[in-house]
Amino acid sequence: MNFNATLIGQTITFIFFVWFCMKFVWPPIMNALEARKKQIADGLAAADRGKHELELAAKAAADNMRDAKAQAAEVLAQAEKRAAQIVEDAKNAAKAEGERQLAAAQANIEQEANRARENLREQVAQLAVAGAERILRREVSAQAHAELLNQLKAEL
Amino acid sequence: MSGEAHTSGDYIKHHLQNLTFGQHPDGTWGVAHSAAEAKEMGFWAINLDSMGVGIILGLIFLLLFRAAAKKATVGVPSGLQNFVEWVVEFIDGSVRGSFSHKNALVAPLALTVFMWVFLMNFMDLLPIDWLPWIATLLGVPYLKIVPSTDPNVTFALALSVFVLVLYYSVKMKGPGGFFAELAFQPIPKFQFPVNLLLEGVGLIAKPVSLSLRLFGNMYAGEMIFILIALMFSGGVLLGVFGGVLQWAWAVFHILIITLQAFIFMTLTIVYLDMAHSEHH
């Protein structure tokens, strides 16, 4: 065990090594480690956030689905109601039209009947006059009895 | 095994001698060719093998880690980055566990201590004759490839840590506070010479124990490898037995070299933590 200047040489070497390590080795590695640690933490946080958002989105989707279903049911009900209404309206309209046409036909018929009756009356009067004329040809002149015949026509 | 090593004693001595460069007594500069020559060179000589291997290993560590640090990305780490991050996180965890103050120096210091000491210890696992044998072929008389079996290396580390301990003790507590810590405990104030003696010994014991623990463990481990290696020249049976022993000891030594590097690092952190903390 004899000491010599190796002691000093190794001390200088050691100091240089420590300096180099402190300056160029330790900080970049530590920085990388810290940065990775942070990145992993961020990643985990993001994953958590994503999961949370997924849950929210699923909930929102379920809500939307329920709303849509309710709306669809409502629309369906409305449509049914509307269809029933239309059918009802159509029925009513048809009924009204029918009645109107019936009334018109009846009026027409009445008119025709009146006209026929008028004609008939005319003809009956003429017939009656003609009959009476034949019967009374010799004794009665048409002119003399016109007033009487007209009175008779009005009574028919 | 070098050409000069004939007996077991020579073989062991040869393995325990550093390649020392210094001034010979006759005034010329050169490499020592024996333990005696190395001793005569006195303090102003340098162990080329400890320095060289230590620097190469340190550079391997730093360049490897620097390469990973440069390419460090936040994304999925590749093989090297993954390994480096694993080591760095381990060191960071140790520092966070033992060091309760803020100091940007401590963690890189701990990393350097751990990796460098580990790599220097790791050289112990290379079969002990490979590199010295190549060195002998190249005309280099000695080569001790485990720098941590050189007390110069372990003391250099421990004394550097000790200087940091003293620096931060004074910086954090002030000269008075540091002196008070040494002088006015554990027994009441008026006994302060006794306290000073006790605490002074305790203080000095830190770097000494730190360096001697590493040196002793590595030196003893190396010694056992050398003794096992002696068996290889004792015939086939002894050689095979030696091979098994060497394998077993190497496996056990994997634990020791890691443990010693870890202990050195942990104690460095703990000593610096104590330097930062106010006692009592």
Image (cartoon, coloured by chain):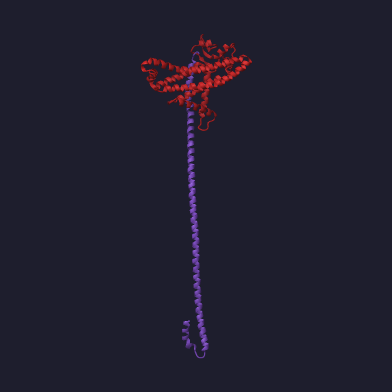
Query: Image height check: is A101 above or below A144?
Result: above
- State whether residue B30 is above or below residue A71: above
Q: Position of residue A129 (x, y in %)?
A: 51, 85
Q: Quadrant of the C terminus of chain B?
A: top left
Q: Nearer the viewer, residue A29 or A95?
A: A95
Q: How many marks?
A: 0
Q: Is residue B50 shown to the viewer in this render?
A: no
Q: Residue furthest bottom?
A: A139
User: Residue at the spot x=49%, y=75% of the render?
Assistant: A111
Of residues B7 and B196, the one nearer the viewer is B196
- Give the red chain's letter: B
Residue that extends furthest to the top in the rendered view of this protein: B26
> Extreme front residue here?
B187
Q: Residue furthest left?
A: B190
User: In which quadrant will I find the N terminus of chain B?
Assistant: top right
- Residue at left offset 46%, top offset 18%: B207
**In x, y percent, where is residue A55?**
48, 42
Image coordinates for residue A131, horizontal then vertical, percent: 52, 86
Seen at 44% across and 19% down, the residue is: B163
| Residue drawn at the location 49% of the way across and 53% of the way down | A73
Evaluate whether residue B246 shows in this view.
yes
The one of B102 and B236 positioned closer to us in this rendering: B236
Chain identifier, colour purple = A
User: Residue B184: x, y in percent?
Assistant: 38, 18
